[in-house]
Image (cartoon, rainbow, N blue to C red):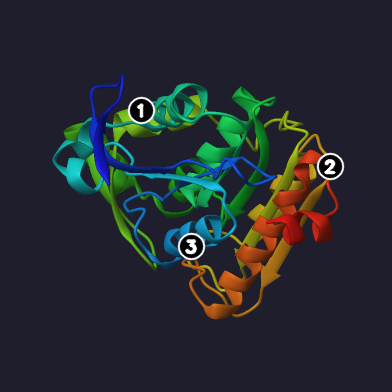
Amino acid sequence: MQKITFKNGHTTLCEYIKPDANKTQSFTVVYTHGFCSDPFGRKPEEVKKWCVEHGLGFFRHELAGHGSDKARFEETTLNTYKNQIFEIVGEMVEGDVIVGGASLGGWLSLMAACRFPDKVKGVFGLAAAPDFLKKYIEAYFTPEHKELLDKYGKVEFPTNDFTYIITKQMIESADENLMLDKEVIPYSGKVRLLQGMKDAALDWRTAPLIASKLAGDDVRVVLMKDSDHRLGRDEDIAVIKSFLEDFITFGGCAKSQSLRRI
């Protein structure tokens, strides 16, 4: 891991393993973690392992205000995170990419796909959570929460799984980037979505809604009846790996041929 200072002024840990030049498929998987989480849990570790085994590139990073940069968390907004992944996909990673991640990371991945449709050859979302702040506020914010937000500019925001600190600036920037209020999400590439139906932090119906709004036809949604927001069970990891296998074919090669060459 190395520290990288982004154009937004935040310095976070990143890891970039470039594709094996001798392999037929030479793209990089860019993984983005969730809100108030990190890129070092089981899901990113399994994605990294799979990429290395198949000669694919792998890039993971801490979001600004998280992990080694957590002292600056309250300075960040959704635009901070968006600009970070745009810089990664647009400038830091060479060649074609697959973008994906958990929760907020899924939202950011969809943003990157819409911003760089020619470079982003596919997206995988793991409990992808576009517009999650708006949904949480509508569902859980009380008049007392709103009073605290107006008075202090921030408020603790609990869910069944996590407790977040939400700033007024974060809410405003999230509202600037709403995705599910649009008729169409303008990305036509391959998309794979995994969602647990026992997710206490996100309505499981979000994944089918995302799928219905995507411009492309090559969209697959997998609902796991006994999985929660973390999607860390063996069964969940197996589905994630099946998604990655799907992306090996994006260049037009048959899957059996691609896997055999790798």
Q: Residue at x 31, y 40 (%)?
A: 146
Are dots 1 and 3 in contact, CB under 8 Å?
A: no
Q: Quadrant of residue 6?
A: top left
Q: Residue at x 42, y 50 (%)?
A: 33
Residue 8 seen anywhere in this rendered image of the structure: yes
Residue 260: image location, x then y, percent? 75, 61
Q: Quadrant of residue 72?
A: top left
> Looking at the image, which is closer to me, 88 or 73?
88
> Looking at the image, which is closer to me, 190 or 203?
190
Q: Secondary structure at mark 3?
A: helix
Q: Residue at x 48, y 26 (%)?
A: 86
Residue 65 seen anywhere in this rendered image of the structure: no
Q: Is residue 116 above or below residue 60?
A: above
Q: Callout 3 environment at 10 Å: few (<14), some (14 to 19), or many (20+)?
A: few
Disc 2 designates what residue? 252
Q: Residue at x 71, y 50 (%)?
A: 247
Disc 1 versus disc 3: distance between alpha carbons? Answer: 29 Å
Question: Which numbered dot is residue 80?
Answer: 1
Are dots 2 and 1 in contact, CB under 8 Å?
A: no
Which of the two marks, 1 or 3, is nearer to us in this view?
3
Which of the two marks, 2 or 1, is nearer to us in this view?
2
Disc 2 versus disc 1: distance between alpha carbons? Answer: 35 Å
Q: Quadrant of residue 215?
A: top right
Disc 3 designates what residue? 49
Q: Is residue 216 above or below residue 84?
A: below
Counting residues from the N terminus, which is met first, the one under dot 2 or under dot 1? 1
Residue 132: image location, x then y, percent? 50, 46
